[in-house]
Image (tube, rainbow, N blue to C red):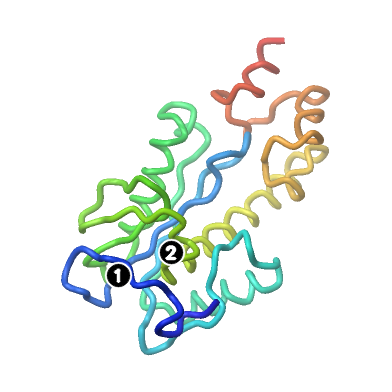
Amino acid sequence: MSTGAGEWPQLPLDGDGSPLLAGVDEVGRGPLAGAVVAAAVILDPARPIEGLRDSKRLSAVRRAELDGLIRAQALAWALGRAEVEEIDRLNILHASMLAMQRAVAGLDPAPTQALVDGNRAPALACPAQAVIKGDDRVPAIAAASILAKQARDAEMGDLAARYPGYGFERHMGYPTAAHLEALRTLGPTPAHRRSFAPVRRCLAD
């Protein structure tokens, strides 16, 4: 799937059709460990990027290639995050909204409108619209999903080196059988989300 005209469905957009349209997405709601990371991207209509799609449907090699292209060719891009402590204090939904707000706030130039993957958009300084399955429908959202996943995967690799034995570099913090077994045998690390039930159970044992 490319960004060529006619290949992406035309979505009803609020606003005036300005090219300063930000796509916004986040990665990391479901894991038991690590931050939630969001990205916001304003693509350059004069420099289309071929092959943008939902980051989960790309190979690691292709995702890395696109990550570099987006960073080099977009009009603007920014990352935002919410830390484990914020996730535990606010809950994962509100922390995800905060990460997306931080990503959009980091864009320069600022967007005139934003499209956000999913069924709920955070409060932003510009008009925002949620788009179900937006990471496979809107090029800018697809670009944001790629940047967010690349950034978070790299962070989980760093956590794997800091906390060996948990396999963070393989499961990225998601509750796989291997991760749950490591939790049971090794206990939670400071990177684990204590408000999530499997981690909370380990702390209670």
Tell me what residue is drawn at x 63 percent, y 34 percent: 32
Lateral position of residue 194 relative to residue 62, left or right: left
What SS does tag 2 mark?
A: helix
**Residue that protrudes farthest toward the bottom in the picture:** 46
In this figure, which residue is indicated by the disc labeled 1?
21
Q: How many marks?
A: 2
Identified at 57% across, 76% down, the residue is 68
Q: Residue at x 76, y 35 (%)?
A: 179
Q: Is residue 122 above or below residue 87?
A: below
Return the x and y of residue 91 as percentages of the image width and height: 44, 29
Amino acid under label 2? Ile
Circle 2 is placed at which residue position? 141
Q: Residues within 10 Å of mark 2 (few under 14, many from 20)?
A: many
Name the secondary structure under disc 1: strand
Return the mark for residue 115. none
Front position in the image: 11 or 50: 11
Percent coordinates x, y for residue 138 in the rendering: 41, 68
- 15 vs 48: above or below: above
- Position of 29 with respect to 41 (left or right) is right
Q: Quadrant of the N terminus?
A: bottom right
Relative placement, left or right, of 148 versus 5 is right
Disc 1 or 2, which lies upstream in sequence?
1
The residue positioned farthest toward the left in the image shown: 16
Q: Quadrant of the C terminus?
A: top right
Task: State which quadrant residue 168 falls in.
Answer: top right
Q: Residue at x 73, y 45 (%)?
A: 171
